[in-house]
Image (tube, rainbow, N blue to C red):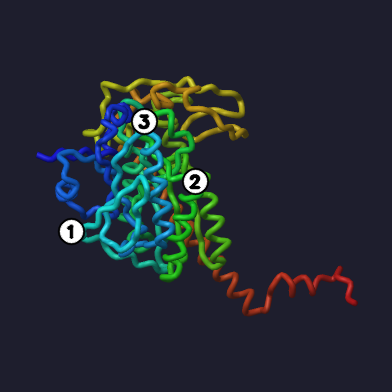
């Protein structure tokens, strides 16, 4: 009987205890039968990494072969550092993805039972690009926590606004700059993460998409998403790309957190009251509440402290072990499924407002550009008409 270990269902202590010769498999797409993979590898045990949902040839948003190689190398880099020795990428394409540490297995895709709706990619819809991560979440939550949460928020937003938004599948790989403190955490690296998303956006722009909202369930992605939005706008002056800080943190989310939270400041940071509440609502089967340890004692100062909505003027680099030895920032024991359900509804509503505002910004700016063009207005022509200009 083949044993399939779903890597991102595990907690970091469980990854810490895995044998380092366990075959770890990264599928490009989610339509491969893991038992067929195990049979081809001639093993009774495999660890299945979360599938890379796009980027590969034939996917909803392909990138160049060189970019795909960089992404796969980045995903596996943390596993190499952690001592895993049998690493495989499974795909059905012609890309050459094998390296000195990664072997490739080429198998045909199975026909999915329910094919996702094709991406329309028109200006009538904002394309949500939800970015999660595969990262430790203390003793009691799975590595997939960030991906589960942001996928639920994005899917709920699109379901509420089908004529205004559509989405890519949630990306389960992001950036963790300090990944070596706790087992299980992966790190694509910031530069690869940015370059990958930029190529994805380039491809979607070529298909006539011009409105994008990059949203994240993982704080470590945020600064790189800011860069991506800026770079994308610099490359394509006609598009409208936006991002924001973490979910449940804006004009609706922030008041909802304060109204319902049970922990004081410091109780919401990572594997905390908020994230645990979301998981108790969305995937209680993956929560191990008997293992929860509260660690709200973040080293704080007036201009630097940890909570879900980080405060203070300072941005510091600090080692995680300074503030947590379990991987938690906050008070997961205070979480309830009821609060998780309530906060999810608020987060979806908040993202819906953002979608409408992106459309409003795009439409108003396009109208202004058309008006300026009709009247021959440019910075140069407006400057020339200024009365203080000295004519020579």
Dot 2 crowding, Cα within 10 Å, few <14, some 14–19, many 20+: many
Q: Quadrant of the N terminus?
A: top left
Q: Residue at x 27, y 30 (%)?
A: 18
Q: Earlier in the sequence, mark 1 or mark 3?
A: 1
Residue highlighted by disc 2: 190
Dot 1 crowding, Cα within 10 Å, few <14, some 14–19, many 20+: few
Q: Earlier in the sequence, mark 2 or mark 1?
A: 1
Residue 305 in view: yes
The quadrant in which residue 62 appears is: bottom left
Foreground pick, 345 / 285:
285
In the picture, measured across the screen, residue 44 lies left or right of residue 255, that is: left
Residue highlighted by disc 3: 183
Give the secondary structure at mark 2.
Answer: helix
Give the secondary structure at mark 1.
Answer: loop
Residue highlighted by disc 1: 110
Tell me: residue 165, above or below residue 133: below
Dot 3 crowding, Cα within 10 Å, few <14, some 14–19, many 20+: many
The quadrant in which residue 369 appears is: bottom right
Q: CA distance from mark 1 to mark 3?
A: 32 Å
Residue 267, percent across and down? 43, 25
Q: Earlier in the sequence, mark 2 or mark 3?
A: 3
Q: CA distance from mark 2 to mark 1?
A: 33 Å
Foreground pick, 103 / 320:
103
Residue 214, percent across and down? 45, 52
Tell me: residue 153, above or below residue 293: below
């Amino acid at each position: 009987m083949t044993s399939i270990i779903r890597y991102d269902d595990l907690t970091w202590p469980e990854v810490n205890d895995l044998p380092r010769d366990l075959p770890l498999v990264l599928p490009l797409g989610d339509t491969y039968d893991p038992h067929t993979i195990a049979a081809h590898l001639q093993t009774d045990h495999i660890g299945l990494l979360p599938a890379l949902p796009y980027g590969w040839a034939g996917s909803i948003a392909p990138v160049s072969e060189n970019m795909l190689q960089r992404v796969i190398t980045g995903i596996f880099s943390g596993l190499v550092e952690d001592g895993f020795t049998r690493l495989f990428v499974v795909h059905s394409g012609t890309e050459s993805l094998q390296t000195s540490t990664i072997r490739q297995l080429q198998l045909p895709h199975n026909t999915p039972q329910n094919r996702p709706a094709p991406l329309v990619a028109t200006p009538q819809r904002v394309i949500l690009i939800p970015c999660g991560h595969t990262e430790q979440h203390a003793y009691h939550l799975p590595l997939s926590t960030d991906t589960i949460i942001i996928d639920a928020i994005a899917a709920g937003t699109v379901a509420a606004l089908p004529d205004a938004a559509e989405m890519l599948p949630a990306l389960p790989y992001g950036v963790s700059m300090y990944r070596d403190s706790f087992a299980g955490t992966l790190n694509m690296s910031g530069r690869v993460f940015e370059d990958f998303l930029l190529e994805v956006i380039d491809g979607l722009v070529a298909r006539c998409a011009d409105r994008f909202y990059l949203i994240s369930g993982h704080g470590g992605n945020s600064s790189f998403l800011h860069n991506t939005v800026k770079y994308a706008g610099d490359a394509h002056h006609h598009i409208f790309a936006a991002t924001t800080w973490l979910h449940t943190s804006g004009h609706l989310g922030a008041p909802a957190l304060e109204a319902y939270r049970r922990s004081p400041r410091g109780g919401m940071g990572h594997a905390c009251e908020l994230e645990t509440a979301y998981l108790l609502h969305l995937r209680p089967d993956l929560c191990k509440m008997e293992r929860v340890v509260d660690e709200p004692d973040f080293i704080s100062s007036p201009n630097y402290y940890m909570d879900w909505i980080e405060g203070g003027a300072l941005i510091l680099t600090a080692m995680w072990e300074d503030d947590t030895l379990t991987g938690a920032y906050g008070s997961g024991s205070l979480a309830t499924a009821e609060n998780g359900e309530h906060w999810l509804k608020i987060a979806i509503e908040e993202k819906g407002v953002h979608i409408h505002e992106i459309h409003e910004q795009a439409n108003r700016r396009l109208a202004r550009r058309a008006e300026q063009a009709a009247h021959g207005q440019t910075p140069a022509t407006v400057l020339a008409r200024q009365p203080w200009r000295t004519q020579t």
